[in-house]
Amino acid sequence: MTTKSVRPGGLARFFIERRNTRLAALLFFILLAANIWLNPARFMPHNWGSVLGLAAPLLLASLAMTIPFLAGRGSIDVSVGPLMGLINVIIVKGLIMAAGVTSPLIIVPAALLIGLASGALNGFLAAILRIQPIVATLGTYLIYAGLALTVLPSPSGSVPAWLAALAGPWSILPVGLAVLLWLLVKRLPYYDLLMATGSDDRAAYTSGVDVPAVRFVAYLLAGVFASLAALSLTALIGSGDPNIGPGYTLIAIAAVALGGVGLAGGVGGMTAAFLGAADIFLLQSMLTAFNVSTFVLQMAYGAVLVLAVCLNSEKLKHLFKARAVPR
């Protein structure tokens, strides 16, 4: 008589298979319950589209930040936030205000092309020239921030109705496009190469993997997801603002770390990025309900980042395992 092993399903299977996201998933349910208790009307089903519109820029920025991290060996793109701001002002000032262009057939491809160009630049600097990624993308961070202020020194302008609608129920479009793109990437051989490179780039290289090319493509993907985040951000604020983009860099890094993405590479993905971003968004929403100042919010983001990095530290995990072993 043979016995069949029973495989857990639903949430139990999720927690078993995704160990690095357990903390983020648990925190998500706690923060969601707290937010529903504090402001039940905001989280009613008919408001879900608006809530997604508010969270969409952070969700997509976190996904953009995740891809380079997966490539390992210190790969990071701190220019994601300023790139969002630069695309925002180019759309509003350069296309809508100056050229009178309002068609999505022009605005959306233009945003994606700018994101691809940024990804190519960062990838060339970090993956091909092998400049330290933090230094290379910090340089583009400053360039994009300066360009945004040059194009549009102060907040102004407005967006067409179709773009503003992306801050409401139609916010599912940029987020859904990002999800579909990620699922497509996961079905390609490139995904296995990316995770192998992030886990051990030397072993991947000796196996014949073109490590610089894998990392270059990771930056390209980061640029694409950042452009989708910029479209969501533009829809959310309804105007051009050169100062709002850079703030997303720190928040996105905190979200990625909290979600369980391995900052050393090879661990994590879209689920981890979205969970971490959702946690940050819900934490922000809860603190805002208590009329907490922006300074306290900044401290909260920093505390979350430090706590998440510590909890995901391999040394700390080994320490807890060593103490858990009975003597």
Image: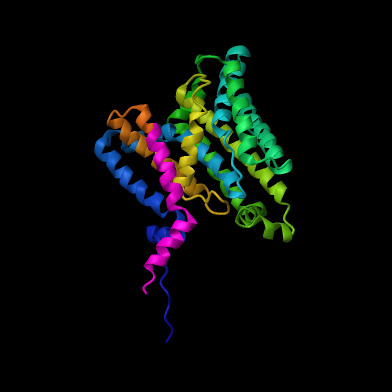
Horizontal relation, residue 33 to residue 150: left or right? left
Horizontal relation, residue 323 to residue 134: left or right? left
x, y (%) of residue 315?
A: 48, 58
Horizontal relation, residue 227 to residue 313: left or right? right
Q: Residue at x 52, y 35 (%)?
A: 174
Q: Nearer the viewer, residue 154 or 187?
A: 154
Question: Is residue 118 in view from this perspective?
Answer: yes
Main SS class of the magenta portion in the image: helix
Furthest residue in direction bottom, as rendered: 1
Residue 301 magenta-highlighted: yes
x, y (%) of residue 21?
A: 44, 53
x, y (%) of residue 324?
A: 37, 67
Q: Which residues are magenta?
A: 298-327
x, y (%) of residue 158?
A: 50, 16
Q: Nearer the viewer, residue 278 or 51?
A: 278
Q: Nearer the viewer, residue 170 or 53?
A: 53
Q: Residue at x 60, y 21 (%)?
A: 146
Q: Nearer the viewer, residue 221 or 258?
A: 258
Horizontal relation, residue 62 to residue 33: left or right? right
